[in-house]
Amino acid sequence: MSITTTETRTSISVLADYEIHHSGAAEDVPGPSATLLTPSFVEPASWPTHHRRIPPYRPVNYNLDFDERPIGSSPGESVFIFVMMHGVWLNASVAKLWRKTGGKLNEGMFQYKVGGEW
């Protein structure tokens, strides 16, 4: 039978490379403005507050500028994001199209067995 030995390495020297050194005084950094901290709306009475980690109420912004929220940096990335976000809808649409056209020739395509059916 063979014996396995292990060598314990100290991680203190590794962690010393990642020590954070703050420079400058604390007064140099401006704090958040008071307008950002106080909301300009009132939470509705039905908004739950007794649960943990519920974010504060934020009304819907109907004036969003979609140019500020790019879908992707390239056309390929945009197609990938679209397919990932619309995958179930895309699969259902292709399945419906297949059933109406080529599904008459091959009925097993786009047929998924649910647990207990096979």
Image: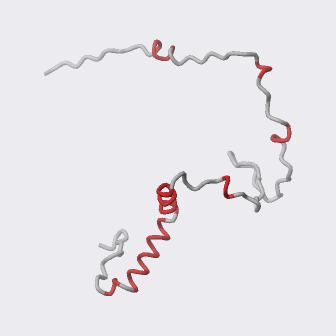
Q: Residue furthest left?
A: 1
- Residue 37 lies left or right of residue 71; in this view the side is right
Query: Is residue 12 placed above or below 79 in the rendered structure?
Result: above
67 lies above or below 25: below
Q: Which image quarter: residue 70?
A: bottom right
Query: In the image, 44: left or right of 81?
Result: right
Nearest to the observer: residue 36 or residue 112: 36
- Residue found 31% across the figure and 82% down from its top: 107
Quadrant where the image shows the N terminus: top left
Q: Residue at x 50, y 70 (%)?
A: 89
Q: Nearer the viewer, residue 109 or 70?
A: 70
Direction from residue 39 to residue 86 in the image, left or right: left
Q: Residue at x 78, y 57 (%)?
A: 59
Write the residue at 76% across / 54% down. Answer: 58
Q: Where does the image place residue 9, in percent across and percent down from the top left? A: 37, 14
Q: Position of residue 73 (x, y in %)?
A: 54, 51
- Residue 71 placement (x, y as % from top left): 58, 56
